Image (cartoon, rainbow, N blue to C red):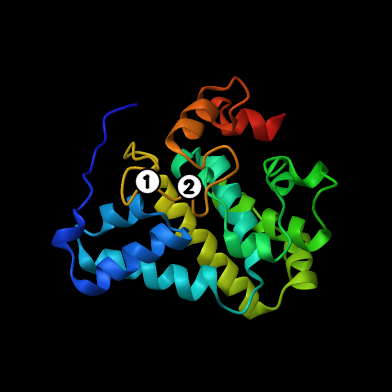
Amino acid sequence: MAKQRISYVPLEKMDAAMRQEMERCAREGTPRPESTAVRAHVPACFWFFANSWNDIVRNGILDHAIKELCRVFVSRSVICEFCGNQRSVKGASEGLKEAHYDDLINFEKSVKYDERQKAALAYAEAIVWRLDTDDAFWERMVRHFSEPELVELGCAIGLTLGQQSWLRLLNIDHHQVLAGTGASMAPGFETPEALAKSKAAPGYWARKPARDRQAG
């Protein structure tokens, strides 16, 4: 594995509230403890993300499964392996299956998504790839989402895009902080051994550049 660029803050250097949040991350995931332990270098950054994620992504006015699909679309686009190898337990409870993640880059041609999901992914695509939008695009958005829902989804995508674009540079990985749980890990990534095997497999999703996958 490439050299880690920013260290994890040890649990004993965190205050009681931060340790409690770390334990929640280990127990429930999304986010996992490793990225949270990096943000702990600056408590304001730690709580900015923890609170924003809880209020905007995990909860909020829009169904969480839509936001989860967009989160993983971002992972596949920026090739953030740390984030892309996680799955939302809440998303699964709302009906997401592993197969829903297979066609994210080529979502428009896929039969795995309904029209509302495709509209949300088109919104994420426009934000991530900085696409121009026209009246038809926005007419599509308002057919499927209210203005408050579009605000929340846009903020969730922006939060995810910014954090994943940063985290992919740090060379952090799972099962390194508060290890021993597979909370919110994708199938095949639940243990250190399974993670290593899946990442070494020829069909591992991160092996193909995102732009090529989008074009293909």
Q: How much space separates mark 2 and mark 1, taking CA atoms?
A: 8 Å
Viewer-side residue, 191 vs 138: 191
Determine whether label 2 and label 1 are within 8 Å by CB. yes
Task: Estimate the x, y position of residue 93 in percent, counting from the top left.
Answer: 67, 65
Asked whether, in this view, residue 62 is left or right of residue 155, the answer is right
Q: Amino acid at mark 1?
A: Leu
Furthest residue to the right? 111
Furthest residue to the front? 180
Task: Estimate the x, y position of residue 110 in percent, counting from the top left.
Answer: 81, 44
Name the quadrant containing residue 64: bottom right
Name the quadrant containing residue 32: bottom left
Which residue is disc 2 drawn over? Answer: 83
The residue at 73%/67% (across/down) is 141
The residue at 57%/58% (across/down) is 88
Q: Which mark is residue 167?
A: 1
In this view, 55 is above or below 210: below
Element type at marker 2? Answer: helix
Determine crowd level at label 1: few under 14, some 14-19, many 20+ residues with C-alpha closer than 10 A.
Answer: many
The residue at 26%/74% (across/down) is 17
Asked whether, in this view, residue 111 is left or right of residue 6, the answer is right
Quarter holding the C terminus? top right
Viewer-side residue, 40 vs 28: 28
